[in-house]
Amino acid sequence: FRQLIGSRPSVCPSQVASSSPDSSPTTKLFIDGKFAESSTSEWLDIHNPATNEVVGRVPKATQTEMLAAVESCSRAYASWAETSILTRQQIFLRYQQLIKENIKELARLITLEQGKTLADAEGDVFRGLQVAEHACSITSLMLGETLPSITKDMDTYTYRLPIGVCAGIAPFNFPAMIPLWMFPMGMVCGNTYLMKPSERVPGCTMLLARLLQDAGMPDGTLNIIHGQHAAVNFICDHPAIKAISFVGSNQAGEYIYERGSKNGKRVQSNMGAKNHGVVMPDANKENTLNQLVGAAFGAAGQRCMALSTAILVGEAREWLPELVERSKALRVNAGDQPGADVGPLISPEARARVEMLIQSGVDEGATLLLDGRNVHIKGYENGNFVGPTIIANVTPAMKCYTEEIFGPVLVVLEADTLDEAISLVNNNQYGNGTAIFTTNGATARKYTHEVDVGQIGVNVPIPVPLPMFSFSGSRGSFRGDTNFYGKQGIQFYTQVKTVTSQWKADDATTKSPAVTMPT
Ligand code: NAD
């Protein structure tokens, strides 16, 4: 850890010994431009998922600390909102460069706390970096509209303006990408930002904050608090916070959407998923099987866009044995080990839940073609490992189909026709992502038009849009009106002011008050 942060002051569980009885290194709060030790008496352990060793501790911030953080955001807002857009752009231009320079350090922190492989962790940073790069286009993204001469000598124009203090609540599975969906877009619009990273993986966000400070971001514009329910309730309730971006489970997302909205805040809530990969018999078999295996088991299935369900249509059913063979070939190991394809799950509880859902499939009559339970990884016997698992003959009523598993488990359904596959997808409660594999354009077009899912890949297994578009999950995977990043992200983090002005060239004066509605 010490090497990861270099000689700079500690921002995450790295250098400073805790003053509490437990001597594990502590994660700092980031308040008013300072990385500060919490005075709380309540701490949570951070584990390395490959070993379950405690690698640090994270505080549950006290009420006083959370108030100090939001007050710092409020104070900084007055000047940050008025800072020239070119200055804001310049800071993000420097920021994206600093992220690039520190990609290995960020990835190593992710692997340590989250478990995913180092290569995958770099992908996590890279997809977030793209959003920080996109933020540099703010001078075009924040343009308003104008309409001259709406009547004689009268013009109307709009400004896009920031809304105030915004807040982000992040999940554990993308420690870099998801916080980077949040604060760069919010802050480049002129808002100040209160971030609550996942308490399981706070280190990466802390280093991202350090880099933003190094890029020249003024004190108080970004504050970071840690914790669980109390911190979430604080964000939902504090009147200075105008908007909340949430990504995580449905349980938390629905709650935050309801509580935040009730308090008059804008909320965008990206939640769980059950993404279907529909395999047509005319698909390129080689590519399709490789893509399916990668998208089902990469990141140990802990991606909201993982293809966790395959629907084999018609003769594509015959590809199942080969799918199993390719899945078996993946190497399960600690994320920092060379050649690892599948790392551990985040916690022993997550592992137990995934194993319970696998067993539920067996108990309900499905066929376990590949069983990843009881994998033993030499040197990592205490890790939360589950190997690639394939459950076939699954039907829509089974628990392993109705619940998001969030592990390296692919459930396989079968369909006779494309219509049958579309009906399965549309009857599922979630609408996050899906993919169709086919070489027929008409089939692909029919699928993309008829399927009720926000993000669709055609021969693309994980169609997470680049940040010039928006992440457009729908139905049970999203609550809110405007999605993350892209044009919708700018809309979420800004308000519009519409100005109508009249400048008469001939200086004509009116003769009497107009009491009728101007037309
Ligand atoms: P989580 O809901 O447990 O945690 C997310 C955040 O909410 C954390 O900061 C946590 O402290 C807080 N939280 C947790 N439980 C809470 C509760 N009961 N009340 C209030 N706050 C609570 O989610 P996770 O396990 O960290 O992440 C995995 C989930 O996130 C999966 O369901 C996955 O599909 C989803 N996810 C969705 C997207 C998307 O864009 N749709 C992206 C990534 C992850």
Image (spheres, rainbow, N blue to C red):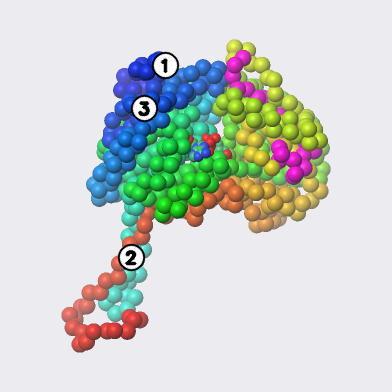
- Circles 1, 2 touching at the beta carbon (< 8 Å): no
Residue at image coords 81%, 48%: 416
Where residue 345 appears, x then y in whole percent? 59, 27
In terms of sequence position, does the residue under pointer 1 or pointer 3 come before the other? 1
Quadrant of the frame with the C terminus: bottom left
Distance of label 1 from label 3 (alpha carbons):
13 Å
Q: Callout 1: few (<14), some (14-19), or many (20+) C-alpha neighbours within 10 Å?
A: few
Left or right side of 96 for 481: right
Pick whichever, 474 or 402, lies toward us: 402
Q: Nearer the viewer, mark 1 or mark 2?
A: 1
Residue at image coords 39%, 22%: 26
Q: Is residue 328 above or below residue 155?
A: above
Q: Nearer the viewer, mark 2 or mark 3?
A: 3
Q: Amino acid at mark 2?
A: Thr
Q: Is residue 418 above or below residue 96?
A: below
Pick whichever, 259 or 175, lies toward us: 259
Q: Which mark is residue 40?
A: 3
Residue at image coords 34%, 81%: 517
Find out whether residue 397 is within the magenta segment.
yes
Judging by the rendered image, the residue that carries numbered circle 2 is 498
Task: Mark yes or no: residue 68 visible.
Answer: yes
Where residue 104 appears, x then y in whole percent? 44, 25
Judging by the rendered image, the residue that carries numbered circle 1 is 22
Mark 1 secondary-structure assignment: loop
In terms of sequence position, does the residue under pointer 1 or pointer 2 come before the other? 1
Distance of label 1 from label 2 (alpha carbons):
56 Å
Q: Amino acid at mark 3?
A: Thr
Give the residues in magenta.
Answer: 381-401
Q: Callout 3: few (<14), some (14-19), or many (20+) C-alpha neighbours within 10 Å?
A: some
